[in-house]
Image (tube, grey):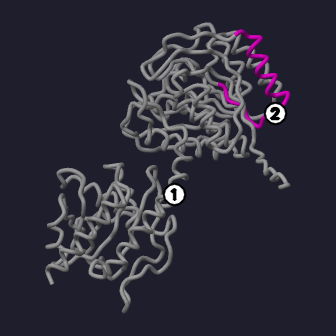
Amino acid sequence: MEDPRRSAPADPPVVLTIAGSDSGGGAGIQADIKTIEALGAFATSAITNVTAQNTLGVASTHPIPIEEIEGQIDAVVDDFDVRAIKTGMLGTRPIVETVTEYAADLAVPLVVDPVMVAASGDRLLDADAEAAYEGLIAESTLVTPNADEAAVLTGTKPDSTESAHTAGRAIVALGADAVLVKGGHIPGDRVVDVLTTPEEEFVFEHPRIDTEATHGSGCTLSSAIATRFAHGDGIRDAVEYGIEFIERAVRYPLDVGSGPGSVHHMVDVRERASRHSTSEAVETVVEALVDADAGALVPEVGLNVVGATPYAETVAQTAAVEGRITRTESGIRPNRGVRFGASSHVARFLLAAREHDPSLRFAANVRFGADVEDALSVLDDVVEIDRSNEPRPDEEASTMGWAASTAFRSASGTPTAVFDRGDIGKEAMTRVLAPEMETLIRRLRALLFALDEER
């Protein structure tokens, strides 16, 4: 008889979320659980309110009886080694006061997301519960108000970085260890989030994303920070991680429902899950080039093929040939295998191009010359950029940003290829772009065939 297999249990830290339920799944307890689990912790919950809502708004709310909320919290803390707690929608003064009593007894990091108004504009907190928040804030490790919530808590609505610092200092004075005033509701081309502690102030700045699909963003951010607390991060590191995470979750939202969609709580999980198929796709392109003996496409610096995951934001999330593809006496060959983070120049250009068309997933740099220029006529939307006009920034990413922006301004749509004639110390180069691996192969083969026809 075959012996049973031995189990291999994991031991994730436990996070408790005390918040309302969102029947639409984008915010509240549902968002919290998705985020906590996605970031490597075990999610437990105590539901404070049941809401009937979707992407269009909140139809109704129903507070859970206090004894049931207490029962849920007791069931969790009596059994689990809770490492962090976050609160979301509490709704009424008795619920706020009940949660405050528990917070005073539980010596773990506490993130208070003072949920007062939904993204749709629907109110989620009774007026007489606002004053009760001061007691909960006094027990908190971090409070995460947006501008409207900061206005309720301090009497002044932040409209700048300095006024956000002022609001943060006022909330810290209530007893919080730290306050993150979120800048999403403050007008401007960039989002500026301001972290205030009794000793220091930090500013986190990033580009604003053109989307209305921000449902659940506050819940997701506070849950991400609480999860990092459970993993042992300090305040600044946990906040920085959470902000970077929510930026990705907003950049790649979920197009669900009839209204604005939801943030993508599982974006990091999906990104990691897509890496194997992305790497395999790059290998397929490389094999196609080797089989076609595509030496006519290889520039002096070598040819590289880059694939970005559907959620790629950094070079580390792009796969490429380590050491590039070079010509040899017996044909072309990759110097080493495919790995993530192996490309710099081509990967940064692809990432910059994705800012204009996120559907782009693949790119290759190929030789440029008079014959290649003629061969490019087989492709649509080919664009030339003049690198003599290129700015001289300190960061290569900025150079690639200029190149991609210049190309997209010149193209009628998404360019299929972008070439330049080089500059002092810079080899002339062609970069071929594609949304799918098959399309990149087809475009490279078309170029190669056109070059063979010219000979």
Q: Residue at x 48, y 35 (%)?
A: 263
Residue 299 in view of the camera: no
Residue nearest the observer in this picture, 66 or 416 = 416
Q: Nearer the viewer, mark 2 or mark 1?
A: 1
Residue nearest the observer in this picture, 247 or 183 = 247
Disc 1: which residue: 275
Disc 2: which residue: 80
Q: Is residue 75 magenta?
A: yes
Q: Quadrant of residue 76?
A: top right
Q: Is residue 398 magenta?
A: no
Seen in the picture, residue 209 relative to 362 is either above or below; the reply is above
x and y percent of residue 255 in the render?
41, 34
Seen in the picture, residue 208 relative to 378 is either above or below; the reply is above
Q: Amino acid at mark 2?
A: Phe
Q: Look at the image and give the residue range highlighted in magenta.
A: 65-87
The answer to which of marks 2 and 1 sits earlier in the sequence is 2
